[in-house]
Image (spheres, rainbow, N blue to C red):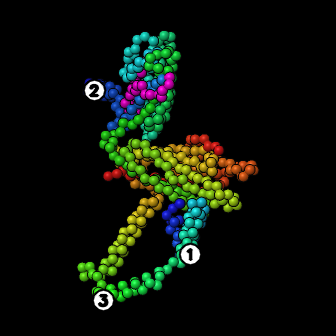
Amino acid sequence: MTDRWNETLSRLIDGDPVDPGVVAEALESPDGRRLLVDFTAVRAAFDRDTAAPSAAFLGQMQSALAAAEPHPAPRAGGFPLRLVALAAAAALLLGVGFENWRHRRVEAPPSAARVLRFETSDWTSVKGGGR
Amino acid sequence: MSYRAIVRVVLTMGFAAAFTGALRSQPAQPAAASPRVKMTLRALATPASKPSFENATADVDLSVGESGSTTISTMSDLCTIAAGGTVDRMSGPHHAWSVHFTLVSVQIDKITVDVTMDRRDEEPSTVKQVTRHLVLTEGTRHVIDFVETSDSASCAVRSMMLDVSAAFDEAPAFARELLSYDLWLTHRDAAGREWTRHESRSARQGDLVDFRFRPLTWTLDALVPAGGRDTALEEHVSGSIRGRIREDGRIDVSCQAMRELALGEGSGGERGGQKIFVVRSGEPIRIELPPASGQSSIAQGNGPSTRLDYAQLFGGHTTAIIVKVERVP
């Protein structure tokens, strides 16, 4: 089971476009099939969840938000706080993305400068098999 | 012939004779870069009711073309032992081994040596001689003799085994250098789909490093669409690798690879081989394994079991290990 299967199957369940080759590869494995069933169960549970906030709760929230409106938006060093938070989140995502890309680069095999082959005569029995 | 011509001929012959003599008197020196190899003779004792233990060792350091000898001797009850040198110091009933080594050639993990073992026993007096041409991987052992005793001696040793092994004396300039090993397993099927695994190791140069990739797993029905079986088929690839830095900066590499194909509870056995090659630091080398072979049987409910041929199941597939060795700065 790989992160690739995880991500692809999760996106498939969410209705996003995915690589059919990765789906086929995942479905060839019992682990991949189990993962798909798990995601389906989570999605079904999510869809079944009809819980909603009560009218009283909504009323309280609306009055609280209305009371907060006259105040100026909080600022950090002259920049709106929302903008600063967005910039921080973007930097964090970029960092995670770069780390992920760097990790995948190491995981991917390099193209070989030379190719050697084990001939059948080089390849001998090390340990007997059986059932 | 004139007087001068005679003098010239005599002088020329004299110089030639002196030069030839000088050459002959030079002792055979090993080349400066010739690696040194330590040949070790070891005695392994086994008591009546305890595990075996190393009882004595004796070493000889050699370069290619050189010869050397060492000895081990023990009393007949196997309780007293002496090792090293060339003189048999035991008196009374005993066994004395003299082992003579001639180093023929040296390559990483492939040391060729001629060994002659001479064993002399006192009371009863016997002589045994064995000559062997050995090709040893570094650190592996080759048994050359075995003796046992029925005496109820106080030390309780019942038998003794003698073996020989070979190890490189690392070049001082590189002895403490580290090498990093990046290893990838790739398996590609006939349709071009590829599965990969990656392992990283680092070790002092000359050290043997084991590796084992996480197994690749398929279901039988993925390999044989009409198979209709959900049994897992696993490819296990493992091995060991050793690198040693050359004086020119390139790296000698010895890679031992093994593969086992396992179906359910059964296995087609483990097969493997060794490749020795030279690389530049950081140069990736792909080593392709032979096509899958062997068979396993799979039970079908209460019915007869079916035999599956791995060559058919993995027809058109290629398994390879990609090796990248680098000097760690």
Residue B65, image x, y percentages: 41, 31
Q: Name the residue rendered at 36%, 71% in the picture.
A: A92
Chain part drawn in magenta: B48-74
Residue B14, by quadrant, is top left
Residue receiving disc 2: B11
At label 2, which amino acid type do we have? Answer: Leu
**Place of residue A114 in the rendered image (x, y in percent of width and height, measured from the top left):** 48, 54
A106 relative to B227 in the view: left or right? left
Name the kind of residue labelled 1 in the image.
Arg
Q: CA distance from mark 1 to mark 3?
A: 39 Å
Q: Is residue B324 left or right of residue B288?
A: left
Q: Quadrant of the N terminus of chain B?
A: top left
x and y percent of residue B37 in the render? 39, 34
Residue B319: quarter of image: bottom right
Residue A123, given in percent of the width and then of the height, sits at: 57, 44
Q: Residues within 10 Å of mark 1 (few under 14, many from 20)?
A: few
Q: What amino acid does circle 3 point to?
A: Pro
Secondary structure at numbered mark 1:
helix
Is disc 1 in the same subunit as disc 3? yes
How far is the residue under mark 2 from the one under mark 3?
A: 119 Å
Residue at left offset 42%, top offset 62% = A103
Chain letter, disc 3 residue: A
Q: Decide whether residue A111 is among the magenta residues.
A: no
Q: Does residue B324 appear in the picture of this structure?
A: no
Please name the residue shown 59% across and 46% down the image.
A120
Instruction: Evaluate if marks 1 and 3 touch, with contact meaning CB atoms under 8 Å apart.
Output: no
- The residue lying toward the viewer, choosing from A44 and B101, is A44
Q: Which residue is mark 3?
A: A70
| Host chain of mark 1 | A
Which numbered disc covers residue A48? 1
User: Which is more toward the observer, A71 or B226?
Assistant: A71
